[in-house]
Image: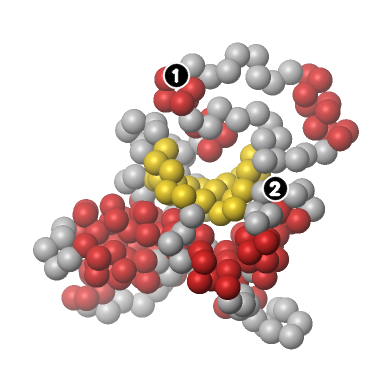
Amino acid sequence: NDRFVAGAPAPDKVHRSMREALATKGQAPHTAIVGCADSRCPLETLFDALPGDLFVLRNAGNTCTHAEGSILGSLEFCTGALKTQLIFVLGHTNCGAIKGATAAYFAAKKQQKKANNALDVLLKGLDTVVAQAVAEAGAKATEEEVAALAVKLNVFHTMNFLMQHSEPIREKVSSGNLEIHGGVYDLKSGRVEFLGCSPSQSKLVAGKSTVAPSLKDKMHGA
């Protein structure tokens, strides 16, 4: 990330022989990243990464609140078949999804509103994160302050979700073969604040995972 912040990317990064090697020998990404779909957060660019370095998954809010099977399944493939040993969950400042979820949370306190579209459902899925941010920020916190805190809490929420609802991932973390870290990207400075592991990791890996809500009717034995 230092090269990106300094505006000095590595020169001549991509060449023909590299593309041919990736095509014929396959990929071996060292890190899987769950990031936000925000166009201001180009993950490969801000880490000055080469093709084949990163296994990237993106959606609005870097979350697993819905369609979690696609995120979990992709990460199980990456950490299993591709043997990637690091999952990095990256949120960012001024996240539109988190700001929208926070605004919806405060609006719902005044008037209950049913979800009318997929976006409403996505934002509603972030209620737990926003509620935690409200509790931690205190009664005098502004909506903007709550949203800023929710960005960080949402990173930990996604990290926890991976261990809670994927037994292959939980087992790899427990055995030391996989690490899950989080971070927050600052849109203005370009720097990534590295948050490390989830405070709940020890408790989560000591238990058993449960099937993700959207997968209960699709998995044998669930």
> Disc 2 marks which amino acid?
Thr
- Dot 1: element: loop
Residue at image location 16% in from the left, 60% down from the top: 141
Residue bearing mark 2: 84
Quadrant in the picture for residue 222: bottom right
Residue at image location 21% in from the left, 54% down from the top: 145
Which label number is shown at residue 169?
Answer: none
Q: Is residue 147 left or right of residue 5?
A: left
Q: Is residue 63 left or right of residue 49?
A: left
Q: Residue furthest bottom?
A: 221
> Disc 1 marks which amino acid?
Gly
Does 172 appear above or below 49? below
Tag 2–tag 1 contact (CB < 8 Å): no
Position of residue 134 measured from the top left corner of the image (x, y, whole percent): 24, 67
Residue bearing mark 1: 7
Position of residue 15 measured from the top left corner of the image (x, y, whole percent): 74, 18
Quadrant in the picture for residue 189: top left
Position of residue 56 measured from the top left corner of the image (x, y, whole percent): 61, 45
Q: Earlier in the sequence, mark 2 or mark 1?
A: 1
